[in-house]
């Protein structure tokens, strides 16, 4: 039985709970402050400290955090719903909230000692990441010696730990992605290299991190195969269904959610221009092409949101019942997430073109939103072609080739 066939028998995620409603309301109430700080966020190339403090105070970083550290351990749908609200106003702030906040879920998959190292003294400590398998690893007694330089560690200046990726070599296979692990490293053992100079998502502060011959104990690593099998060391302590979800499905949804929310903000900006712009005999608001575009964007936006929510409802249905999520469904979910950025870039570009010369001026919200959405497409999780090829292969009788599902 597929996950989709089971979903009707499972209660939907509890967005109607008082806590969920309070979190969503807090996200909406932050809109004026986020809008006021948006330009500073872009110019300083980092999310303002006040915004990170607001996220802490509102409880956003607690949504996926285990309860023993003061977290709420809520359905991930709540986390993504909050991210959508934030991204409507400031995509960089939402991006950092998404990728950093989801690490509070990921560490629950590690051996419990790892979480103790991070949160034993302060449960508000945050973790950044860079998962590219570029690290150089040498197995040593009790763990690994790790060196390397990783790029795109979003929000790293607000964090005291980092997740980085590397493949553990063996005699049989010097580089086999089945031996990929995530390594958890404290800030004392790495350097942040300020080199974030980009055309979009400037406020994410996604600098490089560098480390040389750092010792990482074995318990501070997480195997990709454990995440794929949804059977992790941390599950001995963290038994709630959300911690039995596939690792990459949870992470990539945090990424594509920022694009979705930003597209909704882009539609709002487009509507504001269209209501007042006059560049010919027909005001833009009366132009049938401008009207049709607004309708198409709204419709496609809602379709993408519904697909994302449906997919996670299906996965959570399996997790609650303690059943494996069918691999053919996981392949589809992964592709569904990856194509969101492609569709958002296309729709945003059409709106930018439709507003004409207004959109190319510095200070144009339509332009800045588009550049943020465009930048999101560069994330490896949003490179849809490999996931399309894998899904097509499965549909045509081949085996799944991707452990990052």
Image (cartoon, rainbow, N blue to C red):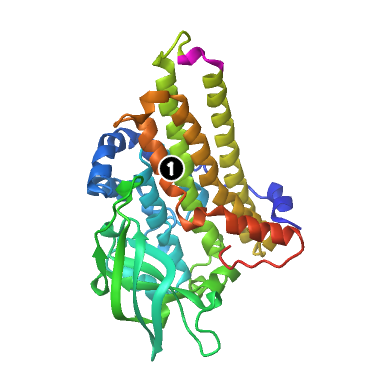
Residue drawn at x 61%, y 44% is 307
**Position of residue 279 measured from the top left corner of the image (x, y, whole percent):** 41, 14
Residue closer to the observer: 5 or 23: 5
**Position of residue 204 measured from the top left corner of the image (x, y, whole percent):** 33, 50
Q: Which quadrant does the C terminus fall into? A: bottom right
Q: How many tags in the picture? A: 1
Would residue 329 be found to the left or right of residue 51 on screen?
A: right
Which quarter of the figure has residue 155? bottom left
Q: Is residue 23 above or below residue 139?
A: above
Q: Which residue is mark 1?
A: 373
Residue drawn at x 41%, y 52% is 98
Q: Is residue 338 above or below residue 286?
A: below
Q: Is residue 299 visible?
A: yes
Crowding at dot 1, Cα within 10 Å, few <14 / some 14-19 / many 20+, comes out as: many
Residue drawn at x 31%, y 63% is 208
**Position of residue 386 measured from the top left corner of the image (x, y, whole percent):** 59, 59
Q: Main secondary structure of the magenta part?
A: helix
Q: Is residue 22 visible?
A: no
As for residue 4 lying within the magenta part, the answer is no
Residue closer to the observer: 44 or 222: 44
Region rendered in magenta: 284-288
Q: Which quadrant does the N terminus fall into? A: bottom right
- Disc 1 is placed on an element classified as helix
Residue drawn at x 30%, y 32% is 32
Which quarter of the figure has residue 154? bottom left
**Position of residue 47 measured from the top left corner of the image (x, y, whole percent):** 28, 48
């Amino acid at each position: 039985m597929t996950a989709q066939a089971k979903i009707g028998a499972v209660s939907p995620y509890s967005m109607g709970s008082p806590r969920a409603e309070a979190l969503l309301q807090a996200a909406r109430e932050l809109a004026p402050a986020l809008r006021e700080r948006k330009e500073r966020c872009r110019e300083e190339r980092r999310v303002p400290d006040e915004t990170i403090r607001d996220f802490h105070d509102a409880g956003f970083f607690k949504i996926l955090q285990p309860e023993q550290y003061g977290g709420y351990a809520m359905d991930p749908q709540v986390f993504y719903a909050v991210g959508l609200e934030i991204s409507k106003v400031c995509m960089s702030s939402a991006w950092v909230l998404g990728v950093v906040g989801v690490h509070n879920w990921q560490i629950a998959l590690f051996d419990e000692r790892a979480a103790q190292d991070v949160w034993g003294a302060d449960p508000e400590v945050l973790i950044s990441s860079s998962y590219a398998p570029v690290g150089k690893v040498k197995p040593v007694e009790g763990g690994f010696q790790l060196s390397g330089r990783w790029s795109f560690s979003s929000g790293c200046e607000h964090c005291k730990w980092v997740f980085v990726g590397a493949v553990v070599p063996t005699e049989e296979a010097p580089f086999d992605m089945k031996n990929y692990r995530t390594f958890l490293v404290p800030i004392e053992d790495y350097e942040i290299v300020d080199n974030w100079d980009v055309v979009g998502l400037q406020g994410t502060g996604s600098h490089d991190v560098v480390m040389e011959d750092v010792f990482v104990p074995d318990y501070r690593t997480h195997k990709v195969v454990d995440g794929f099998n949804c059977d992790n060391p941390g599950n001995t302590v963290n038994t709630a269904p959300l911690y039995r979800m596939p690792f990459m499905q949870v992470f990539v949804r945090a990424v594509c959610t920022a694009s979705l929310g930003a597209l909704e903000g882009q539609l709002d900006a487009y509507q504001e221009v269209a209501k007042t712009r006059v560049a010919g005999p027909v005001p833009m608001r009366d132009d049938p092409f401008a009207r049709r575009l607004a309708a198409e964007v709204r419709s496609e936006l809602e379709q993408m949101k519904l697909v994302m929510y449906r997919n996670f409802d299906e996965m959570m249905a399996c997790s609650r019942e303690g059943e494996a999520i069918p691999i053919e469904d996981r392949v589809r979910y992964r592709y569904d997430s990856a194509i969101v950025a492609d569709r958002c870039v296309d729709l945003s570009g059409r709106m930018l073109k439709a507003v004409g010369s207004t959109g190319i001026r510095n200070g144009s919200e339509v332009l800045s939103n588009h550049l943020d959405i465009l930048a999101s497409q560069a994330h490896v999780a949003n490179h849809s072609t490999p996931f399309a090829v894998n899904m097509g292969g499965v549909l045509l009788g081949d085996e799944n080739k991707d452990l990052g599902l």
